Structures are given as structure tokens and as C-alpha cells.
Amino acid sequence: MLKIVIMETVNNRIERFKSLYKTAFGVRKYENVYQKIYNSNKITKLLSSAADKHLAPHSLDYLYALNEIPYFIFSKGDTQALGAIIAFERWMRSENNEVRHITGIELNQILDGIINESSKSMLTIRV
């Protein structure tokens, strides 16, 4: 039961960040970032590598992978955070069922790491 509550908290935090991003930058830009992440070979490679090793990618793994995608290289921290969060959400939906040893607390730590690292260059969104 506790794991479900913590997982909902992670999902709620993700949805809140996405909502704040859409309010600040618009749905069109959000959808553009979403498509970039879901069509990215770099993100697919990161997630496949993690799945092969039965490990969860670290928050910095998402951000490093983003910086290999031309669209994100000069993006603001807000956009990089959104991209990393969408990639993290993509991993949670596809691979977390395979990685049984990760807890809701660890999922929150990954999310915190993404937000904290990106907040150094965030200009608009404050979480």
C-alpha cells in the first residue's frame, strides 16, 4: 500500500511539473518536447541499456542523454527538465515493471535529481 501511495506521489509530481511547463511555455512547445523524447534514438538507447542491465537510469543519465540531442543542447533548464522528466516517465511506464528492486523513494530521488540539477539553469518554473 505504501509503495502505491509513493508511486502516486511521483506521478502527481510529474503531472504537476508538466502542467506548470504547459502554463509557462504553451501546449505546443510541450508537445514538441514530448515528441523529441519519444522519437529520440539517444533516449531509446539509454532506456535499452538500462533494461539490459536491469537497472534504473540515474537522474544525470537522463540529462546527459538529452545533451546529445541537438534540440536540447542550448535549451533552458526548464525544457531540459521537462525532457528528462518525460524520458523518466517513459522508463517508468516501460521498464519499472522489470526492475523490481526500485522503490517509490528511489523514484522520487531520481525525480528530485532531475529537477535539482536542471534548476541551476531554470528561468521560469520553480518547483
Image (tube, rainbow, N blue to C red):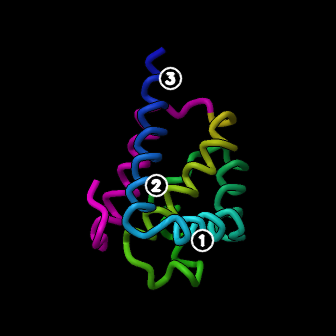
Q: Secondary structure at mark 3?
A: helix
Quarter residue 65 falls in? bottom right
For the point 37% across and 71% down, which residue is it?
77
Residue 125 rendering spot, x and y as whole percentages: 31, 63
Circle 3 residue: 4
Give the magenta range.
100-127
Crowding around mark 2 (Cα neighbors within 10 Å: few <14, some 14 to 19, many 20+) is some
Name which residue type carries label 3: Ile
For the point 52% across and 71% down, which residue is it?
29
C-alpha distance separating marks 3 and 2: 21 Å
Circle 2 residue: 18
Could you tell me if the residues under marks 3 and 2 are in contact, i.e. CB atoms within 8 Å? no
Q: Nearer the viewer, residue 22 or 111?
A: 22
Circle 1 residue: 32
Q: Nearer the viewer, residue 126 or 41?
A: 126
Q: Nearer the viewer, residue 100 or 20?
A: 20
Q: Is residue 102 magenta?
A: yes
For the point 36% across and 49% down, which residue is it?
112
